[in-house]
């Protein structure tokens, strides 16, 4: 394996500048780029703007993690339309559907013991399910080959299962996660203590 010239330069230098650190970190991030998953929530964004954000971060695959890939409020994101528009943009659309569970990575699985008596989702239960682990494994396999984003409907990741469930599991599996926000800025996701009781917000 060829040695990293920037690493060698840092070792040989007596004093390390901020520029040295930035160059080294950048090289490291590029090297680890196949261990990154992006997330995005379409909200009420116009479709051209949504596609522009994906192109900005060179997304190659979009994995739809909505339990039901339909919306009467923003019909441009209905599965048939979004799949066609993504194809035109050179982006593959993926929906990990199971006839019994629904979307393997959806926030509202068709499994009764994932909910409490009030119908609220319990993420700690979902995380333990074999079908969820299968969906997560398939997502990671895709992301290690091509630049991947997971999409849900809620724009704010903190109010969505893509952060409170999927992101937390990805982080525990050594993946990096970045949330793409509607203003075009990305936020690096952080580990949170997994709630063993009910989450404040249900999945979408």
Image: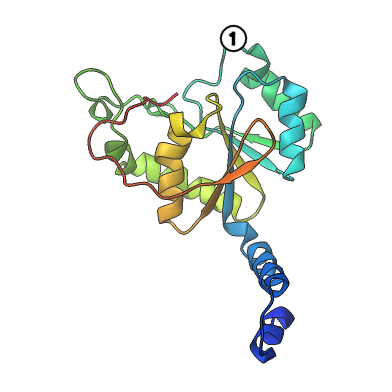
| Residue 116, position as x, y percentages in the image | 22, 24
Q: Which residue sits furthest left?
A: 117
Identify which residue is drawn at 64% across, 12% down.
75
**Residue 186 drawn above or below residue 156:** below
Q: In the picture, which quadrant includes the C terminus?
A: top left
Q: Quadrant of residue 144?
A: bottom right
| Residue 145, position as x, y percentages in the image | 64, 55
Of residues 12 and 50, the one drawn nearer to the viewer in this rendering:
12
| Residue 165, position as x, y percentages in the image | 40, 39
| Residue 86, position as x, y percentages in the image | 73, 30
In the picture, measured across the screen, residue 75 lies left or right of residue 89, that is: left
In the picture, measured across the screen, residue 189 lies left or right of residue 148, that is: left
Q: Is residue 191 visible?
A: yes
Of residues 130 and 47, the one drawn nearer to the viewer in this rendering:
47
Q: Residues within 10 Å of mark 1 (few under 14, many from 20)?
A: few
- Could you say whether the residue bearing mark 1 is in a helix, strand or loop? loop
Q: Is residue 105 visible?
A: no
**Residue 174 drawn above or below residue 127:** below
Identify which residue is drawn at 32% across, 27% down.
200
In the picture, measured across the screen, residue 203 lies left or right of residue 21, that is: left
Identify which residue is drawn at 49% across, 20% down.
68
Q: Quadrant of residue 117?
A: top left
**Residue 143 drawn above or below residue 1:** above
Of residues 163 and 83, the one drawn nearer to the viewer in this rendering:
163
């Amino acid at each position: 394996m060829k040695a990293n010239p920037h690493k060698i330069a840092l070792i040989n230098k007596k004093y390390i500048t901020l520029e040295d650190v930035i160059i080294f970190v950048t090289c490291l991030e590029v090297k680890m780029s196949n261990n990154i998953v992006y997330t995005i929530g379409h909200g009420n964004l116009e479709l051209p703007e949504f596609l522009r954000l994906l192109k900005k971060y060179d997304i190659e695959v979009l994995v739809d993690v909505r339990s039901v890939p339909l919306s009467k409020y923003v019909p441009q994101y209905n599965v048939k339309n979004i799949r066609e528009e993504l194809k035109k943009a050179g982006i593959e659309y993926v929906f990990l559907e199971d006839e019994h569970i629904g979307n393997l990575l959806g926030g509202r699985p068709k499994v009764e013991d994932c909910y409490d008596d009030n119908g609220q989702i319990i993420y700690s239960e979902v995380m333990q399910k074999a079908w969820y682990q299968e969906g997560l494994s398939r997502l990671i396999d895709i992301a290690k080959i091509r630049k991947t984003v997971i999409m849900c409907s809620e724009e704010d990741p903190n109010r969505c299962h893509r952060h409170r469930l999927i992101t937390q599991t990805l982080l525990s599996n050594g993946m990096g996660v970045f949330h793409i926000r509607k203003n075009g800025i990305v936020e690096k996701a952080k580990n949170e203590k997994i709630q063993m009781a009910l989450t404040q917000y249900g999945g979408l």
